[in-house]
Image (tube, grey):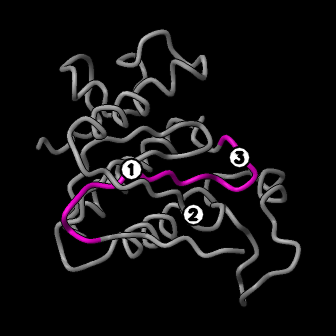
Amino acid sequence: MKKIKHYTDLGHAHFITLVINKRRAVFLNSETARKAIQAIEFYQKSFFIKILGYVIMPDHVHLIVWPQGKKTLEEFVRDYKKYLAKEILQRLTISEKTKVLLGRPQKRNHLFQIWQKGYYDFNIYNQQTLNEKLNYMHYNPVRKGLVENPEEYPYSSCRDCVGKGEVLMEVDKI
């Protein structure tokens, strides 16, 4: 498998996608979706990363992040996925856990795989591309038939961007 090179310099933002293993819809559970947003906030502060946008879809997470500190984007993603995997496992029923059971555990006590390996990273160098990625991300719930308008979807930064409805997490403005 070819290793994807991630460009993580501090000069620009990144559109990243994290996908649940086998596309299981673990974020349909509102408690788990809210936990995903809380984890973004926590790691945003501890990693000095600006969050410019997010959406928590049933089976994946989109983020637009801009690293500001000394820690890398890879470290942010690693820690976020690790923490959230533990939270997700606690909420799964026994039958749901068997669906994410590893055939051959790689490490001791590593029986489950919640996330697909790696992540998608698209570098954003200008405002036009940032706007395109924000629109793509915010309209994702509409394209998937979850809502009719992007601001109706509760697990997205769209409400903060347009100033409508309950905001679960404020995003950074640039």
List x then y, in percent, for residue 11: 19, 64
Q: Earlier in the sequence, mark 3 or mark 2?
A: 3
Question: Disc number at residue 100?
Answer: none
Q: Tell me which label, 2 or 1, sits earlier in the chain.
A: 1
Q: Residue at x 31, y 27 (%)?
A: 158
42 sits left or right of 81 in the view: left
Given this view, does label 2 or label 1 mark the residue nearer the observer?
1
Crowding at dot 3, Cα within 10 Å, few <14 / some 14-19 / many 20+, comes out as: few
CA–CA distance in space, label 2 to label 1: 21 Å
Which residue in the rendered view is the most extreme toward the right? Answer: 103
Report helix, strand or loop for mark 3.
helix
In the structure shown, which secondary structural element does the residue marked by tag 1 occupy?
Answer: strand
Q: Is residue 51 left or right of residue 39?
A: left
Question: In the rendered view, would you say 115 is above or below 26?
Answer: below
Percent coordinates x, y for residue 159 in the rendering: 28, 24
Closer-to-camera residue (82/9): 9
Asked if residue 148 is positioned above or below residue 5 in the image, the reply reads: above
Amino acid type, callout 1: Phe
Q: Where is residue 152 in the image (x, y as percent from the top left)?
A: 40, 16
Residue 85's tag is: 2
Q: Mark 1 points at which residue?
A: 15
- In the image, residue 12 lies in the stretch drawn in magenta: yes
Name which residue type carries label 3. Arg
Q: How far apart are marks 3 and 2 (CA)?
A: 14 Å
The residue indicated by pointer 3 is: 23
Which tag is nearer the camera, tag 3 or tag 2? 3
Give the camera-side residue of 117 and 120.
Answer: 120
Secondary structure of residue under mark 2: helix
Q: Residue at x 17, y 67 (%)?
A: 68
Viewer-side label of 1, 3: 1
Q: What stretch is highlighted in magenta?
A: 9-25
Residue positioned 23% across, 16% down in the render: 164
